[in-house]
Image (cartoon, coloured by chain):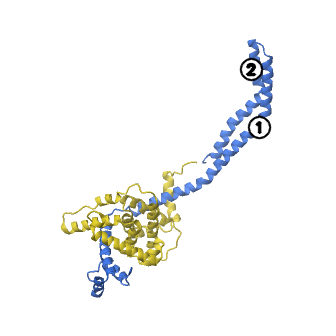
Amino acid sequence: MRTECPREADVVAAVLDGRWETTDEGLKTHAGHCEICRDVVAVASLLSVDQEQTRRDVHVPAAGQVWWRAAVRARLEAAHRAAQPLTWLHGIAGACAVGLAWTVAGMAWPSIRDAASWVSTQAWGVDSRVGDVAVLVAAVVQKSLPLAFVAAACLVLVPVALYFALSDD
Amino acid sequence: MRDATLSDVERLGAFDEAERTFQMTEDAFRIFYDQTARAVWVYLARTTGDDRLADDLLQEAFYRFLRTRTTFENDDHRRHYLFRIATNLVRDHRRRPRKDDGRMDEALEGLAVDEDANVGDRAVQRIDLTRAMGRLKKRERSLLWLAYAQGFSHEEIAGLLGLKTASLKALLHRARKRLVALLGNPRQSGERL
């Protein structure tokens, strides 16, 4: 079965240029006998008329508006791309903070263990007198003072460090 | 991660920066856009059967066109490239699940039938055509539109759609026969066309 005709391009050109009615009789006669070209005339006539009418009716955005949107979007995408390395930096800073906290905790662990051991020793020796409880609390506070300092330092320094690491400026 | 947003000042900067970012100047773009935008919109609307989607895809097509690094030999090359982008956008959209198959019917609502006899006949013809096109596959619509509304050659369409010319000719022939049958034989579509 034939799927193309060598004169199809001529027929399409004549229809789309709006000169089918005035085109040479040879081409018209051919289209009358050629099933392919007859269909091409029918389809191209309808589609070209539809295209012309729709093109007239349609309201596309103004060129300046499309340009403006594209410019803003390009800038936005550039900003997004620039922010991607910063995201990695955030992750690395977070991991560093966790690692630092873990290291400090490891370093402070002997002090914690000593303090806990001392507290348990004192607790076994304590009698029912209320005054001894106050002494015990004071002793615990005094004993774990270095640990408290380390914890406080972490609480203050880590957010400050994170602020400087993650700050946009 | 912080959101990428632009201040008003940055937006103004974007406007100044655009000519360095894009592959053509604003003045050149205006001329090219005025020559091609309507044709591309109609192609997108007729291929997708969805006017609103055509609006979105039109903006996307021109954005991609502006961002391309391709060097164009002439205006025809530019136009073909733009239609290729539009075709790819339709193809990408086709791969997504369709939320609404009734968009073609919505498109018909915009085609009001005029009181005047000739205009009315033409409007009815357009409604018939829109319905018939709606019965075709999107690729068939693309083929027919590029060939018989845009007047692209078989080789050009094959290049746009990434097909071999021989396959394109067979597909185009089949699509044309289907459209003619749908237009000429309303019963085939189960309703008046």
Classify residue A72 as left or right of residue B42.
right
Asked if marks 1 and 2 fall on the same chain, the answer is yes
Residue B92 on image: x %, y %: 47, 62
Reading the image, the residue beneath label 2 is A137
Can residue A131 be seen here? The reply is yes
Nearest the camera: A60 or B133? B133
User: SS of the residue at dot 1?
Assistant: helix
State the image quarter where residue A63 is shown: bottom left
Real-space Cα distance between discs 1 and 2?
Answer: 25 Å
Give the colour chain A carries in the figure: blue
Q: Residue furthest bottom?
A: A26
Residue B102 on image: x %, y %: 34, 57
State the image quarter where residue A7 is shown: bottom left
Residue A106: mark in rendering: 1
Chain colored yellow: B
Query: Which circle's residue, 1 or 2, is located before the other in the chain?
Result: 1
Residue depicted at x 30% and y 83%: A31
Which chain letter goes with mark 1? Answer: A
Residue depicted at x 75% and y 31%: A147
User: SS of the residue at dot 2?
Assistant: helix
Which kind of residue does numbered mark 2 sit on?
Val
Residue A81 on image: x %, y %: 57, 56
* In this view, the mark in front (1 or 2): 1
Nearest the camera: B56 or A31? A31
